[in-house]
Image (cartoon, rainbow, N blue to C red):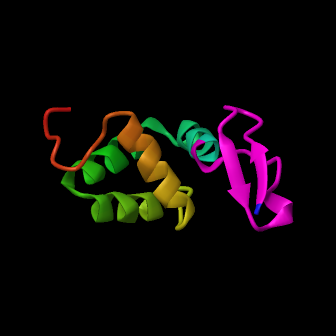
């Protein structure tokens, strides 16, 4: 395995693919992707995540531009870390 620190957040990363070394971690890429989406897409995706992880992933795929697997899994974790979770209808 090859190890490096994410150039944006400093988290330790590892991969078996040499071309991935010294690239941003999945959460940093997910953050950048999220910030590029319009507010309407944010609301649509967050509402879907509150209904469940699978609806959230499907909403990411339906966004414009779409967020496809496996990158959508990182975006889902990014939203979970922001407090958007399945079953949370209070937000």
Please name the residue shown 36% across and 43% down the image.
Answer: 80
Please name the residue shown 57% across and 39% down the image.
Answer: 31
The single residue placed furthest to the right in the displayed view is: 18
Q: Nearer the viewer, residue 75 or 13?
A: 13
Q: What are the residue bounds of the magenta stretch?
A: 2-27
Tell me if 13 is positioned left or right of 60 in this view.
Answer: right
Please name the residue shown 30% across and 40% down the image.
Answer: 84
Instruction: Estimate the x, y position of residue 88 in percent, counting from the top left.
Output: 17, 41
Tell me if 82 is positioned left or right of 17 in this view.
Answer: left
The single residue placed furthest to the front in the displayed view is: 1
One can see residue 66 in this view: no
One can see residue 18 in this view: yes
Instruction: Estimate the x, y position of residue 15 in percent, counting from the top left.
Output: 72, 61
Residue 5 placement: quadrant? top right
Was residue 11 drawn as part of the magenta stretch in this picture? Answer: yes
Instruction: Estimate the x, y position of residue 73 in percent, counting from the top left.
Output: 47, 59
Q: Nearer the viewer, residue 17 or 59?
A: 17
Q: Quadrant of the C terminus?
A: top left
Instruction: Estimate the x, y position of residue 57 in percent, counting from the top left.
Output: 39, 62
Tell me if 8 is positioned left or right of 21 in this view.
Answer: left
Where is 42 relative to 73, above or below? Answer: above
Q: Nearer the viewer, residue 58 or 22?
A: 22
Q: Quadrant of the N terminus?
A: bottom right
């Amino acid at each position: 395995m090859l190890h490096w620190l994410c150039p944006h957040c400093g988290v330790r990363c590892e991969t078996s693919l040499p071309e991935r070394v010294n690239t941003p971690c999945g959460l940093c890429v997910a953050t950048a992707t999220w910030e590029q989406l319009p507010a309407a897409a944010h609301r649509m995706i967050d509402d879907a995540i509150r209904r469940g992880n699978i609806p959230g992933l499907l909403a990411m795929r339906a966004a414009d531009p779409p967020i496809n697997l496996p990158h959508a899994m990182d975006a889902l974790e990014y939203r979970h870390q922001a407090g958007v979770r399945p079953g949370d209808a209070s937000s």
